Image: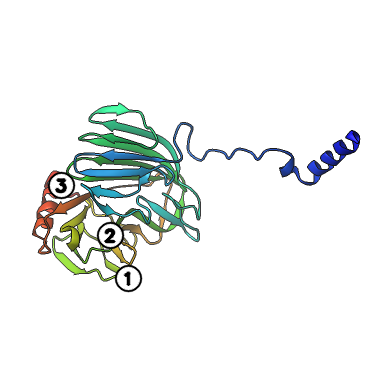
Amino acid sequence: MLKKLTLTLCFTALLFPAMAKDEPTPSRLYDEGIPENGFLTLKTGKYTLPIDAASGWTIEKMFYGDHQFGLSNGHYGTVLTPKGGKWWGTGHKEGGREVVHFLKLTVDGKQVPIQQDETVSGKRIELIKDSTIWKFKTQVKIILTDDYIFEHTQIEALEDCELSVLYYFMHIFPTTTTRWMAQLPDGSTETGPLEHAGNHQIQKNTRWVAQFDPPAQQAYVCYTPKVITGSQSASMIWDLDRYHKYYLRQNKGEKFTKGQKLDFTVLVKAVPNENGDWKATQKAAKQLMTRFPPVD
């Protein structure tokens, strides 16, 4: 009887090898020591910024005081599609995953260890990330203060390649915003409605763009000291009924040579006490431009 049972088990193992042994442990995506799941929350007196490990250590949502002005129903950061390919970057998996290699967290000038599902508080918090998105080496620096959210992203082509699109920065603002204002590179301003129309508003290169949120009596400004330009570049708000997502598109189809670099910054600021006349918003944008002068 024992001999018959042994033969049966051996035969089963040959036919169904997955049943005969434990499933292999999935390999790591990020470099050793980089957490692949969980959240790290950055907090100053006015801003709270949860960072999502699973989405390539990118912003998950944004708070000013107790008010959430950055939603979590989409991705922040940098994404791209190779020519003829699918999405890479942040939480996208369609084409391939962003691979995180290095993280460094500094709080008020002191480097501190990175722990999953913890909150770090300070007056000035800096998070640096090195990663690879498809054929691009990427370094991201996020600085959180009581005055703004600073995002600086550098990318470098590791080999000759071609893209269908590169969204350099993305931010997800609430559907309670009803109007936008933009300053163009020549200093002129334009405004327009947000009505969940399903289209893209603005679609021009801009110095800064703001959205007005009447229920919160706030506006949200995104300022780029160096205007983000490239092949068919554009600053756009996707005016949907689930979010008013703000894209800074660097290109819509562009070839890169090995070693070619892009280097851009965006500052995000919540503006309280905005009543719709844009005075508080324009004052806040001017202060950002004084602190971080425009780069031509």
Instruction: Say which residue appears at 71% left-offset and 38% top-offset.
Output: 21
* Mark sitting on residue 199: 1
The amino acid type found where label 2 is placed reads Pro
The amino acid type found where label 3 is placed reads Pro
- Outermost residue on the front side: it is 1
Q: CA distance from mark 3 to mark 1?
A: 32 Å
Mark 3 or mark 1: name the one nearer the start of the chain. Answer: 1
- Asked if the residue at tag 1 contacts the one at tag 3, i.e. Cβ–Cβ closer than 8 Å, the answer is no
Q: Nearer the viewer, mark 1 or mark 2?
A: 2
**Residue 124 versus residue 55 in the image, above or below:** above
Using residue 6 as the reference point, say whether residue 244 is left or right of it: left
Identify the residue position indicated by label 2 in the image: 174
Q: Position of residue 278 (x, y in %)?
A: 11, 61
Picture quadrant of residue 251: bottom left
Q: Position of residue 273 (x, y in %)?
A: 11, 55
Identify the residue position indicated by label 3 in the image: 293
Q: Position of residue 41 (x, y in %)?
A: 32, 40
Q: Is residue 207 visible?
A: no
Q: Nearer the viewer, mark 3 or mark 1?
A: 1
Q: CA distance from mark 1 to mark 2?
A: 16 Å
Q: Secondary structure at mark 2?
A: loop
User: Is 62 or 164 nearer to us in this picture?
Assistant: 62
Q: Secondary structure at mark 1?
A: loop
User: Is 165 or 288 nearer to us in this picture?
Assistant: 288
The amino acid type found where label 1 is placed reads Asn
Looking at the rendering, in which quadrant would you find the N terminus?
top right
- Crowdedness of circle 2 by 10 Å Cα count: few (<14), some, many (20+)? some
Mark 1 or mark 2: name the one nearer the start of the chain. Answer: 2
Picture quadrant of residue 200: bottom left
Q: Secondary structure at mark 3?
A: loop
- Outermost residue on the bottom side: it is 197
